[in-house]
Image (spheres, coloured by chain):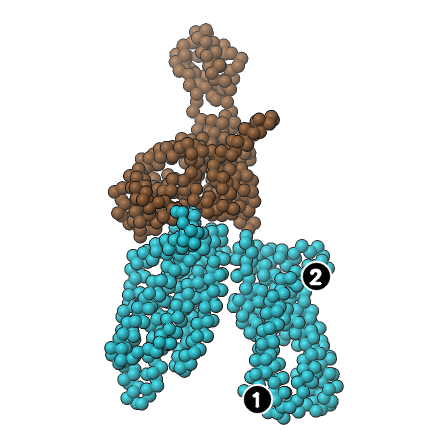
Chain colours: A brown, B cyan
Amino acid sequence: MSLLRWLAIILHQMEALVVTHDLTKMFRTLTAVEGVNLTVHAGEVLALLGPNGAGKTTTIRMLSSILAPTRGRASIAGHDVVQDAEKVRSTLGLLTEHHGLYTRMKADDYLQFFGRIYGVPEESLEKRIRDLLHQYDLEDAAELRLGHYSKGMRQKLALVRALLHDPQVLLLDEPTSAMDPSSAHMVRESISGLRGANRAIIVCTHNLHEAELLADQIAIIRKGKIIARGSPSELKRNLLGDPIMEVRLAQSLNGLTPYIPDEVVVIAQGDDWIRYRTPEPASVNPLMIRSLQDGGYDVVTLSEVERSLEDVYLQVVSAGTRPEGVEP
Amino acid sequence: MTASSPRASILRGIHLVAMREIRDQIRDWRILTPIILLTLFFPLLMNITAQQAVDFVTRYGATIIGDRLVPFLLMVVGFFPISISLVIALESFAGERERLSLEPLLATPLRDSQLYFGKLLASMVPPLSAAYLGIMVYLLGLYLSIGWTAPPVLLVQVFTLTTVQALVMVSGAVVISSLTTSVRAANLLASFVVIPVAELIIIESMVMFWARYHVLWWIVLALFLIAVVLARMGLRLFNREELLSREIDVLNVRWAARTFWDAFRGNATSLGSWYRDVLRTTVVQLRIPIVMLAVALLSGYFLGVDLARTFTLPADLFQWDGIGGEMAEYLDAFNLMGTAGWLRILFVNVRAIIIATLLGAFTFGVLGVILLMITFGLIGYFAGNVALAGGSLSQFLIAFILPHGVLEIPAAILAGAAILQLGSAALRIPSGRSLGEGWMDALAGWARVVLAFVIPLLLGAAALEVFLTPRVVMAYFGG
């Protein structure tokens, strides 16, 4: 690798807001997280997926300087999670797995309390609270005691708490759990909006649809280890193979196989459809259409077969081992 | 936090945490109701009680009882509201953890110490305010009804005592809360605070009825020292790592055994290397406790000497000419001669060390050291009596104590130092080690010292006591 390439990699790493290297946490004899390497840049969303007890929450707690790593290191916006713990906690917003609200307080008092702890200037705190309550549709409930909030409202208020000090890094543990579909949609939209130029977000979720919608990168964690990492499309390609295309024809094939170019690998065929796998849809699809037309078949539709992140997740998690070609 | 001096910033964090909790308490009728009752109605009830009692005892000329009862009730009026501080502290520390509202707070830039002191203040301020107010109501009532005013010194004593008692209860509750994961478990463990405090109140009552009011200052001092020790322990335990690493209160015997064995074995590869390791580390680790123990045992000895002046034994008990033969008969009668006697003395000494360890392990080493001090106090007491009877102190010590004391005294000092080290383990847990790990390390350290030094020394001491000491006595005193 050339010196310039190395330099480019180092500079890229320096821009990252969240960096972990060999991050490991042991509780007595139990290894909860082992050798986790992650990099999240400003403007990126990383979804951390994994079954219950996989080590997601422990990873988040180490990143938020609540638990100290047993081995390895991590930094948030350039601050070491062990050496600069207070700076780390000032820099990030954490939505905990359990909302943990004080149920006898009102939203306004509650947010003022946390705003003051985070050092939000008094002159802007009121406005910040009002704006966020308005944004998350909680304005009307501001005078209610938090004990009277629904689960979804509590979750939204906990998210507001995490956003109060406009953090550079957001760590969201199950941000839409317990929310009704419209609230969940609103929160997802909001998270998309939050990935502004200078903010990195890590979302722990069981909701694979949500991860696919929000994340630029997905890391799948199992038994404390990252077993797959990449963008949703990279993961699909690496784990489920090349894209699968389906062509639908106007005429019946009557059990015959039409002339098909050598580049195309047919994986299934029906009465009036053919499915094939190709690493290069842009060049292969036009060839396929021409061949079919030359054979007297009219093409009605040609589209990629939808493959969900769930397929990827289930394959990786059930296999339990690191699949080949997938970056750990 | 906003830009300000570090100290102001720290205090601001403590203030924020404390004020939020205090507001929360004021919103909870379950806390508010007993505080109001104990602040207003209880002092009035005590007023009536005091008034009735004074009237009654005056009728029979026993005014002294009334004189002692009124200050005693002053202390009780102050104590009742602060008893709530224990419940508030358990709720504030263990309760918040159980309700899972602690983690968002732990994710803020607040330091562990800010959270700790904020919660400590919040647990103390409302009950203490109620206690002070209750005392005022009681005093006002007494002044209006029987014209009694408290002597200023007594007032200062009661206010100080009430404050320090609240501090001890809250710091104790924090330690308990930090060791549990639920309010239920914390409440069960709270008896470790409730029972000693109840006993303390009984002692204070006796002191007040006896009108030995100066003793209250010693109690204040002792409580203050206990509060400092507990607060230090609480600060050590109340940290993010410890709070979130503890998931459920399960006793893991296998883990405990492994931790103990790892610490006990150290880096040793053979018995010889283990002994060298123990010798090297013990000298380093125990040097301060050894000095403390030596001072404590010497103090015990001189206290015994001093007691001999007050409780002097008849001088003819110390006429030892020809005692050697008599002594041999006694030893024989009690089966203390020969191998059986050797084993018996060894058993008694080892039993004393085990009892001292059990007492010391849960009292920061204090009771264990006191037990050893009593033994030296007895030696001092007899030595004092010998001196008062005109005998030779050096003869007594050389003949009766020194032959086996050469080994027994170092054994007692080493065992006491190890007990002190074990008892104070919770206060000196190395960073990165949990309380359980720290305690198992300390227990292993104790076992290393006892097995490597104390038992071999006691084996030798018991042999000397049986086979050499009687001969030295006979050589000195004949018979």
Does the image show residue B451? Answer: yes
Camera-side residue: B258 or A88?
A: A88
Residue shown at the point (52%, 68%) measured from the top left: B363
Residue shown at the point (36%, 53%) measured from the top left: B16
Image mark for residue B275: 2
Name the side, left or right, on which A305 lies relative to B467. Answer: left
The disc, 2 or 1, on the residue closer to the chain's N-terminal end is 2
Question: Label 1 is found on which chain of the structure?
Answer: B
In percent of width and height, residue A155 lies at: 35, 43
Does the image show residue B335? Answer: no
Residue shown at the point (29%, 80%) measured from the top left: B148
Eyeballing the image, is B433 above or below A281?
below
Q: Amino acid at mark 1?
A: Thr
Q: Residues within 10 Å of mark 1 (few under 14, many from 20)?
A: some
Q: Amino acid at mark 2?
A: Tyr
Question: Label 2 is found on which chain of the structure?
Answer: B
Q: Which residue is mark 1?
A: B312
In percent of width and height, residue A150 lies at: 31, 44
Residue shown at the point (56%, 87%) measured from the top left: B309
The quadrant in which residue B322 appears is: bottom right
In percent of width and height, residue B449 lies at: 64, 65
